Image (tube, coloured by chain):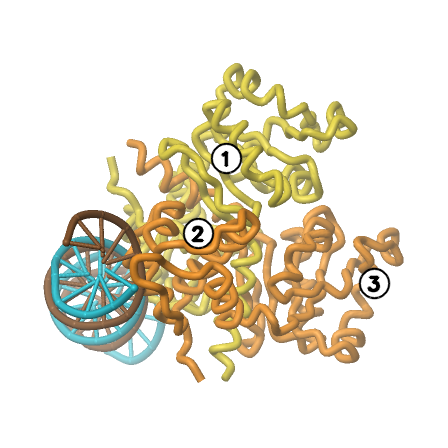
Chain colours: A yellow, B orange, C cyan, D brown
DNA sequence: TAGATTGTTAATCGATTAACAATC
DNA sequence: TAGATTGTTAATCGATTAACAATC
């Protein structure tokens, strides 16, 4: 078994993957580390170092074979392993994520949505049904889903998280601007969009002044 | 003028801010660094170190004054400075972001949306009008908007980015899974949701095996 | 060959953590 | 006082960058 990749490396690998997907579409066969680096505005030796993490041989004087590299990244990050998820919150963001078919390329399958609004229950979005939140525990157990994507409002976030805890789901991808209090065995990944925006504007300002 | 904060610090400050907002709502007056650290599952001396970056004095034996700390973070990250933005792409994600009023707390004001679909032009979402993409350059100049939030499909991403370039907008917050080729003076912040998901599932797996 | 690129090492840089005196 | 906390230093850890021999 390969050793774990650092988070930063995983992040960059996903960006390389985006580039490779575009190269394939454009029928480009080879790509070099300086080329990847310049597209992302990072250092070229960093690209080579990242690619050494996943065992992949480039060709001197030529670069890397796009198709091969793309596949190597997909294997390293296990795109192939289906990861079933539920979306909690059938609002705009929940719908957007449910409709975002691109996710399935990355192994993420959204099976259903949940909401506490009875008017939304029973509707369908992109072939995914909206269930009442009270059905979550039962369906999670029967379908063996252990990822919850939280898109409810800040006010409802903790209550929704509690339901997720009771459903014995293991991972929460948290799109709400709330810090959830959950048991240690449940892992939370905070997407924190507003915070992301602040990082973006803050670091951009700095670079320009 | 204070020196620039490292990106990692800015990121954590936004998370602290989320916690402080909840504390205020719960009428909690003081919070200690070990308390913040345990909520986020990080080191407590790191919290203190981050808070030293923004000049803020805690009280021995007590912790930090919630209201004061919250405001200090808001000042450091300039929540108060209005940052006007356009959303390019009036799809589900564009609508979700347009409806996300929480952004305005962070200084982000979405003024309008743009799309190339004539059926969407003229509609309104959360008091924000949808314009045809051809109006972008003119409106950006007149309203002095220099942030574009890109929520179009992967296929349309580069074309949309080109329009943004022509509109002389300075910053793109890119929600599409495309690596944009733009001039150096235009800065891109890749949100890369699918990549974020992979980091989340990858690092979670690692911690549990 | 000349030029471009890889793979990898060593050097640098920055971020995190541990520790503890000072404080209330 | 005893206990909890801050502010800060030093030690550790990890990530990035520079450099270059080897390769085609």
Query: Where does the image place residue A62, in percent across and percent down from the top left?
Result: 36, 61
Mark 2 and mark 3: Cα distance apart in space: 37 Å
Query: Chain letter of disc 2?
Result: A
The residue wearing badge 2 is A66
Query: Badge 3, how many Cα within 10 Å: few under 14, some, many 20+?
Result: some
Towards the viewer: B94 or B1: B1
The residue wearing badge 1 is A107
Mark 2 and mark 1: Cα distance apart in space: 20 Å
- Look at the numbered discs 2 and 3 and tell me whether their residues touch, using CB distance below 8 Å: no
Marks 2 and 3: which is nearer the front? 3
Left or right, residue A127 beside residue B173: right
Left or right, residue A84 beside residue A7: right
Quadrant housing residue A194: bottom right
Marks 2 and 1: which is nearer the front? 1
Quadrant housing residue A123: top right
Q: Which residue is drawn at the image coordinates 36% and 65% (left, top)?
A: B58
User: Does residue A117 lie above or below B62 as drawn?
Assistant: above
Query: Where does the image place residue B4, in percent across and percent down from the top left?
Result: 41, 76
Towards the viewer: B145 or A174: A174
How many marks the image carries: the answer is 3
Element type at marker 2? helix
Query: Where does the image place residue A135, in percent across and percent down from the top left?
Result: 61, 19
Element type at marker 3? strand
Dot 2 or dot 1, earlier in sequence: 2
Label number found at residue B132? 3
Left or right, residue A76 beside residue A171: left
């Amino acid at each position: 078994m390969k050793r774990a990749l650092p988070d930063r490396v995983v992040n960059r690998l996903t960006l390389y993957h985006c580039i490779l997907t575009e190269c394939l579409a454009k029928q480009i066969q080879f790509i070099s580390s300086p080329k990847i680096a310049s597209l992302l505005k990072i250092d070229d030796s960093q690209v080579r170092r990242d690619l050494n993490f996943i065992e992949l041989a480039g060709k001197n004087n030529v670069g890397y074979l796009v198709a091969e590299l793309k596949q190597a990244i997909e294997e390293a990050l296990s795109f192939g392993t289906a990861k079933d998820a539920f979306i909690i919150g059938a609002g705009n963001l929940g719908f957007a994520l449910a409709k975002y078919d691109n996710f399935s390329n990355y192994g993420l399958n959204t099976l259903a949505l949940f909401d506490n609004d009875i008017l939304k229950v029973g509707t369908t979005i992109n072939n995914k049904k909206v269930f009442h939140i009270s059905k979550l525990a039962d369906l999670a157990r029967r379908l063996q889903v252990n990822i919850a994507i939280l898109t409810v409002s800040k006010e409802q976030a903790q209550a929704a998280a509690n339901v997720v805890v009771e459903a014995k789901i293991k991972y929460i991808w948290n799109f709400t601007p709330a810090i959830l209090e959950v048991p240690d065995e449940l892992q939370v990944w905070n997407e924190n969009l507003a915070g992301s925006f602040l990082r973006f504007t803050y670091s951009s300002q700095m670079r320009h002044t």
